[in-house]
Image: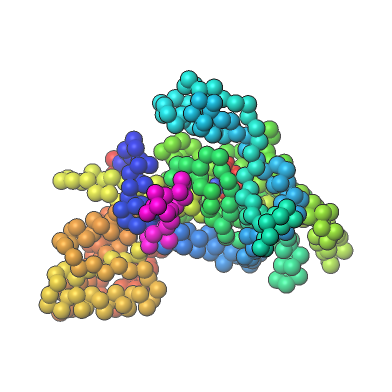
Amino acid sequence: MAKKPASQMDVIVSLCKRRGFVFQASEVYGGVGNTYDYGPLGVELLRRVKDAWWNRVVVERSDVVGLDSAIIQHPKVWETSGHVGGFSDPMVDCKLCKGRFRADKLEDARCPEKPSKRPGECAGELTEAREFNLMFKTTLGPVEESGSVAYLRPETAQGIFLNFKNVLESARQKPPFGIAQIGKSFRNEITPGNFVFRTREFEQAEMEFFVPPGEDQQWFEYWREARYRWYVDLGIDESKLRIRDHEASELAHYAKATSDIEYEYPFGWGELEGIANRADFDLTRHSEASGTDLLYFDPQTKERYTPFVIEPAGGINRMALTFLIDAYEEEQLEKDTRVVLHFHPEIAPITVGVFPLVKKDGMPEKAKEIEAELRRARLATFYDEKGAIGRRYRRQDEVGTPYCITVDGDTLSEDVVTVRHRDSMEQEKVPVADLREYLEEASRRWVRPAPKG
Ligand code: ATP
């Protein structure tokens, strides 16, 4: 693909707003810092990413089942998990500009007054680092008192551990098996930023895979590879993807091993998803603290044990942003430049654009008929009859629509349409009766286009 311009994040942010992927939240009131709403195309992109994840992790497997647990759990859950005591980031303040920064991420931070400098490298002096807990507190019920304090979950994983026994008993599973969940998590991040990369409210996709102790290392390696493969299968450029194993000093208190799948963003390498071997930490702690034993009894071997847990944990919004950045290309053509998002057809918000060549001779009616047929087949379509046909193709390229269908004179006389492919811009005549099958086959065979140079 062509070289990406230096200010690629600005280009992406502006495309997202212009075409209805992402808007600033509460914009009419001046916005809330680093909080975003997803527009018509953004919400479709998120849905496709969630579906692609759920299909791969749950639907295609017989050993993983789903769950949707509550955002607000018993406050003791977060004491037991270690979040009340330890889910914090070190924070420093600038004594001069009063800016707040994560002490462990100063490398990536900029002084708000002198963006060419890092905090502490300008005239301002930084305070000593102190720990700042990232959980959002709220109160349950009508009386605000200390006894009614609750937390918005900072991860979806704990809801899964709490339901280990319920699922085990109701879903006829036994280790090795997994429980998957997609849902909102909340973290009062000290320095949210880089658009939707780090926000205080975001969606996570997590799966806890429970295995007999001793099988944990092999399953850790399995999920590390499987999750990496998912990104590659959905078209992510492998030269921008890497797996980074955590050093022992970097490991979270619950983890025996962790690997991050990282992507090279315009602002540098960043975590896209983490895969952790959480050993038996969570089930043991919840068993001890709640008094409910969360062991597994194997009726065949008569063994009773606490399963080890392998956890792939990713962020849906961060995945969607990554797919957007990775798909973006400004392609140099003979006469001009075209902006195109080379989304995998499975995650493209719109699958087919449907256009009448001209707004007369019964073409709009025929085009609408074809569009309705495709919609009934659950294909995401967009009907457009305004402007020159080339312009209409370009508008769809910019939002990553893989196919456009044009209804012309041949459609009326011979029942064939022109299918135009986003990546190659090649056009092909296809009988209307074969359209659905043709599009499904093209999507199945999609491969990431080679760089145009
Ligand atoms: P970081 O070190 O970037 O703060 P983390 O290691 O705390 O992230 P995890 O707790 O492993 O992140 O969360 C799993 C995934 O959830 C991350 O890989 C990321 O995709 C997503 N995620 C975490 N925090 C945020 C956030 N503030 N905004 C958006 N996505 C997030």
Point 56% across, 25% down: residue:
126
Quadrant containing the C terminus in the rendered view: top left
In percent of width and height, residue 380 lies at 36, 68
Magenta-drawn stretch contains 89: no
User: Quick check: can you spot residue 134?
Assistant: yes
Quick one: 422 or 339, which is closer to the camera?
A: 339
Please provide percent x and percent y for residue 37. Answer: 43, 56
Q: Is residue 73 above or below residue 221?
A: below
Which quadrant is home to the N terminus?
top left
Give the left or right position of residue 372, taking residue 75 as reference. left
396 or 410, which lies in front? 396
Q: Which residue is drawn at 54% across and 34% down?
A: 100
Residue lying farthest to the right in this orientation: 302
When asked about the image quadrant of residue 148, the answer is bottom right
Residue drawn at x 32%, y 78% is: 373
392 with respect to 401 (left or right): left
Residue farthest to the left, as pictured: 361
Specify start and end residues of the magenta stretch as a single range.
25-43
Left or right, 434 with reference to 132: left
**Residue nearest the viewer, comparing 272 with 310:** 272
Query: Could one spot residue 180 in this view of the protein?
Result: no
Q: In this view, does 64 lie above or below 200?
A: below
Q: Quadrant location of residue 434? A: bottom left
